[in-house]
């Protein structure tokens, strides 16, 4: 270690020898992280899940609004957690603070071995599919071409996050504006048609005979999934300028923009397409553009691809900080909590997902894996928000610069646990498998953390100075 430290102290680009993650996330960058990760391919491709399960146009719009409000409740709860516990790491950090290391490690384990690599691979596959679609139109895109483009997309995102936090955020802002432009291209002509009197698809919008009460929970499940991403700023709290003000403000502004955009986008869809046409479409935005814009519709897949790239970028930026914090807490190898001496990025924490993501991209059924794991997201988010309520009583003197009424986290945590129960009821096999995979975190915790019996090859490979020298990383100073 002394050799490495000597090298670093002589490094001219390290300011006064101090290496740390800089506070470079401003309000605008915070908003772009949240919006950029929430708005992925979903709103452009297939909002029909909500329509199918709600049964009517009117009820589907009610579900979109209600899911936006519920997501805002979750986001406000996380704003309190983020301002009272000013550490990066998101769900992991809040569960650690409220319920201790074992519960936090189980969450981390499920994230590391399956959820995050699979989620990143799926977003990347959507990027590969849509970036190539204009080239191969009207034919289908070859599978190998999709995988190649996907690999290039993943590699470029990893490189960007490894090289510069500032450029990562600048690209995220640019991509967020491109997403909002794409949504505006849908909303403006749709509302123009609506104001011209094109309202036939909204007649009998709340037809009682079509409303499916039994399907409403599934519609809410789809809606909450579409809004997921409001928690990503909490993964990078330590890099946020003035977090007491920036975190709540960025969350509230972002959720208002996303809810507004989602609802108006669906209104535009329904103005141009009937419910039957929307349900029959494989990619709603493409069908919409074909009806409204003719040849210009080839631009829609490009916008979808850019949207996916923005989600990849924002997700990786957030995930790497969770692994960085978990390493600092002793739950992952020490090298993951080290910072590049010149770039000031958590290089090892960024790169750790790369081999697993590419591996899952080329082998295995990623979509099945996501089915196994989707309910775990809401289980642990529900646990984190429950931790907020728990800490109100166990740690009443904790500083809380931003404090929400208690009914907000109560309603949101109940919603999360209801969705988990719904998963257990509607798909017990896949949910059970996902639950079993996460429970492997219990023996892993005792083997790797409590008994500290890490395999010798792992200690040698990740604990010695050669890895630090190769990656040019050292422990961050706090």
Image (tube, helix red, strand yellow):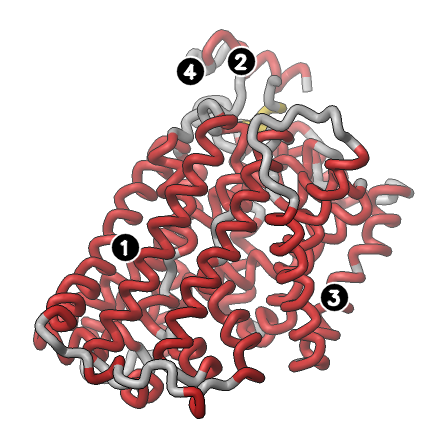
Name which of mark 3 and mark 1 comes first in the sequence.
1
Name which of mark 4 and mark 1 comes first in the sequence.
4
Residue under numbered circle 3: 437
Name which of mark 4 and mark 3 comes first in the sequence.
4
Camera-near label (4 vs 2) is: 2
Q: Nearer the viewer, residue 325 or 444?
A: 325
Residue under numbered circle 1: 179
Query: Residue at (35%, 66%) from the top-left corner?
Result: 43
Quick one: SS at disc 2?
Answer: loop
Residue under numbered circle 4: 13
Q: CA distance from mark 3 to mark 1?
A: 35 Å
Residue under numbered circle 2: 18
Quick one: SS at disc 3?
Answer: helix
Q: Residues within 10 Å of mark 1 (few under 14, many from 20)?
A: many
Q: Nearer the viewer, residue 212 or 14?
A: 212
Q: Residues within 10 Å of mark 3 (few under 14, many from 20)?
A: some
The number of discs equals 4
Q: Could you tell whether 218 is left or right of 306 in the image?
A: right
Q: CA distance from mark 1 to mark 2?
A: 37 Å
x, y percent for residue 425: 70, 80
Which dot marks residue 82?
none
x, y percent for residue 144: 38, 74
Res 291 seen here: yes
Q: CA distance from mark 4 to mark 3?
A: 44 Å
């Amino acid at each position: 270690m002394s050799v490495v430290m000597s090298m670093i102290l002589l490094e001219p680009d390290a300011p006064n020898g101090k290496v740390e993650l800089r506070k470079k996330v401003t309000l605008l960058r915070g908003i772009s992280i949240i919006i950029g990760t929430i708005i992925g391919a979903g709103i452009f491709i297939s909002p029909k899940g909500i329509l199918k399960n709600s049964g009517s146009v009117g009820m589907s719009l009610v579900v979109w609004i209600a899911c936006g409000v519920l997501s805002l409740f979750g986001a406000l709860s996380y704003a309190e957690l983020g301002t009272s516990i000013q550490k990066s790491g998101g769900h992991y950090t809040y569960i650690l603070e409220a319920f201790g290391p074992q519960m936090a490690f189980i969450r981390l384990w499920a994230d590391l071995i399956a959820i995050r690599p699979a989620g990143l691979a799926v977003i990347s596959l959507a990027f590969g599919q849509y970036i190539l679609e204009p080239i191969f139109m009207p034919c289908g895109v070859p599978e190998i071409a999709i995988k190649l483009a996907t690999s290039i997309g993943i590699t470029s995102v990893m490189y960007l996050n490894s090289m510069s936090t500032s450029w990562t955020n600048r690209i995220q802002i640019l991509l967020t504006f491109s997403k909002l432009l794409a949504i505006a291209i849908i909303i403006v002509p749709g509302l123009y048609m609506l104001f011209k009197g094109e309202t036939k698809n909204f007649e009998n919008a709340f037809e009682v005979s079509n409303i499916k009460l039994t399907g409403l929970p599934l519609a809410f499940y789809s809606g909450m999934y579409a809004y997921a991403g409001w928690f990503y700023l909490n993964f990078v709290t330590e890099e946020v300028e003035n977090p007491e003000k920036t975190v709540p403000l960025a969350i509230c502004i972002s959720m208002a923009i996303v809810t507004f955009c989602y609802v108006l986008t669906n209104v535009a869809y329904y103005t141009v397409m009937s419910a039957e046409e929307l349900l029959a479409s494989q990619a709603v935005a493409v069908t919409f553009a074909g009806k409204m814009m003719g040849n210009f519709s080839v631009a829609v897949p490009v916008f979808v691809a850019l949207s996916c790239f923005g989600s990849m970028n924002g997700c990786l930026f957030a995930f790497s900080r969770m692994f960085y914090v978990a390493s600092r807490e002793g739950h992952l190898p020490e090298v993951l909590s080290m910072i590049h001496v010149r770039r000031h990025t958590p290089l090892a924490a960024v790169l750790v997902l790369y081999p697993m993501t590419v591996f899952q991209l080329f082998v295995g059924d990623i979509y099945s894996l996501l089915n196994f794991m989707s309910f775990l997201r809401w289980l642990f988010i529900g646990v984190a928000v429950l931790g907020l309520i728990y800490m109100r009583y166990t740690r009443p003197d904790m500083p809380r610069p931003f404090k929400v009424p208690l009914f907000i986290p109560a309603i949101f945590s109940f919603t999360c646990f209801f969705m988990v129960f719904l998963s257990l009821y509607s798909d017990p096999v896949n949910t059970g498998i996902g639950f079993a995979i996460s429970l492997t975190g219990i023996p892993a915790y005792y083997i790797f953390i409590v008994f500290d019996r890490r395999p010798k090859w792992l200690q040698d490979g990740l604990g010695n100075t050669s890895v630090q020298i190769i990656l040019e990383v050292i422990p961050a100073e706090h």
